Amino acid sequence: MELTTTVSELTKLLSSVRREGRTVGLVPTMGYLHRGHCSLMEAAARECDEVLITVFVNPLQFAEGEDFETYPRDLERDMELAAASGATVAFVPSVAEMYPGGEVLTTVTVSGVSEGYEGAVRPGHFAGVATVVAKLFSMTTPDRAYFGEKDYQQVVVVRRMVTDLSMGVDVVACPTIREPDGLAMSSRNTYLSDPERRAAPTLHAALRAGASLIESGERDPAVVRATMEDVLAAEPLFRLDYLDVVDADTMRTPERLVGELRLIGAATIGRARLLDNIGVRVDG
Ligand code: AMP
C-alpha cells in the first residue's frame, strides 16, 4: 500500500493508475478504523482495481464545542488495518493540504435532505461533509465511492449532491457492522465508560422495537416514534436527540408508513453521541 500526504503526489499516482485503465474505489474516513471501515475497503477491493482510503478529520464538519480536537487518532494502526483490508493507496492529508486557501469561502450545500435530524442538531455539519467529499471526488475522480449506511443521512446527502452536480461517481452504500450486542461500530465508541458501553445497545434496541411494530402492521409514525422513545427512556444514561421513522429517499416522515422506510436515531451517552438506523420495507 502506498501512503501519500500531498495532493500532487496523489494526482501523479492516480494518473498512472488511469493510464493503465484501472478502476478506482474511494473510501473516505476520519480514521481510527474499525471493522465497519474495513468492510467498506473490502467491498471496494471486490469491485475495483485500486482501493483508495482517505484518513482526514475534517474540521469543516465539526461545530464549535464538538470533538474535533479530541477525535481519536491512531495512524499507524489505521495503515495496518487498511493494508490488511485491501487498500492499495492511503491519502492522509493535513488540514493545510486540504484547505490551502486557509479560510474556506466555497462550500457545497445540499438543501432539503440535509436540513432535519443531524443537520438540525449539528448546523453546518452536512455542508462540511458535502464540501470535503466533493473535494475528494475532484482530487481523485473515483469510479465508485463507498459509504456506510451507519451514517444514513450522509449517504442520502452525498447521493443527492452527486445527482445534482452530475459528478458521475457511483455511490455504494454498505451495511452497518455491529458488535454482537447490536451496538453499531463507531470510532466514538471509545469514549464510552464500562456502564455506558453496557447501556449503549439500547439505541439499537429502540430502533428494533420500532421496526417490529411496523412489521406487525402499525402504520402511524407517531405510535412508532413513541414506542422507540419509551425503549430509550428506560435507559437513564441516554439523552435523546431524536428517534423517528422517515421515507428512505426524502428523509421526511410520511403520514402513513408505506414504502422504503428508515428508522433513525441519535442520542448522547456520556461523552459519546451515538447514531444508528435500520431499514424496513412496507409493500403498499
Ligand atoms: P467515519 O470515519 O466515521 O467518518 O466513517 C467513514 C465511513 O465509514 C463512513 O462512510 C461511515 O458511514 C462508515 N462507517 C462508520 N461506521 C460504520 C459501521 N459500523 N458499519 C459500516 N460503515 C461504517
Image (cartoon, grey):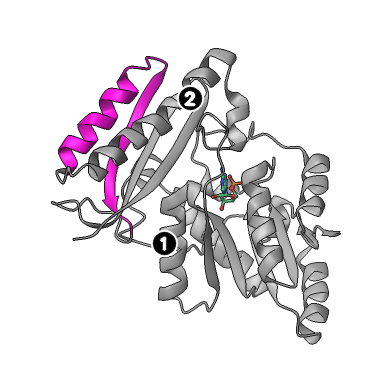
The answer to which quarter of the image holds residue 87 is: bottom right
In the picture, measured across the screen, residue 111 lies left or right of residue 27, that is left
Q: What residue do we see at 47% from left, 27% from top?
A: 201
Q: Secondary structure at mark 2?
A: loop
Q: Is residue 56 visible?
A: no
Is residue 238 found inside the magenta-colored segment of the image?
yes
The answer to which quarter of the image holds residue 101 is: bottom right
Q: What residue do we see at 76% from left, 66% from top?
A: 7
Is residue 63 found inside the magenta-colored segment of the image?
no
Give the CA separation, mark 1 to mark 2: 32 Å
In the picture, measured across the screen, residue 182 lies left or right of residue 208, that is right
Q: Which residue is mark 2?
A: 200
Q: Secondary structure at mark 1?
A: loop
Q: Position of residue 199 (x, y in %)?
A: 47, 19
Q: Which residue is mark 1?
A: 109
| Residue 225 vertical placement versus 132 (above, below) | above
Closer mark to the observer between disc 1 and disc 2: 2
Q: What range of the chain is rendered magenta?
A: 221-248
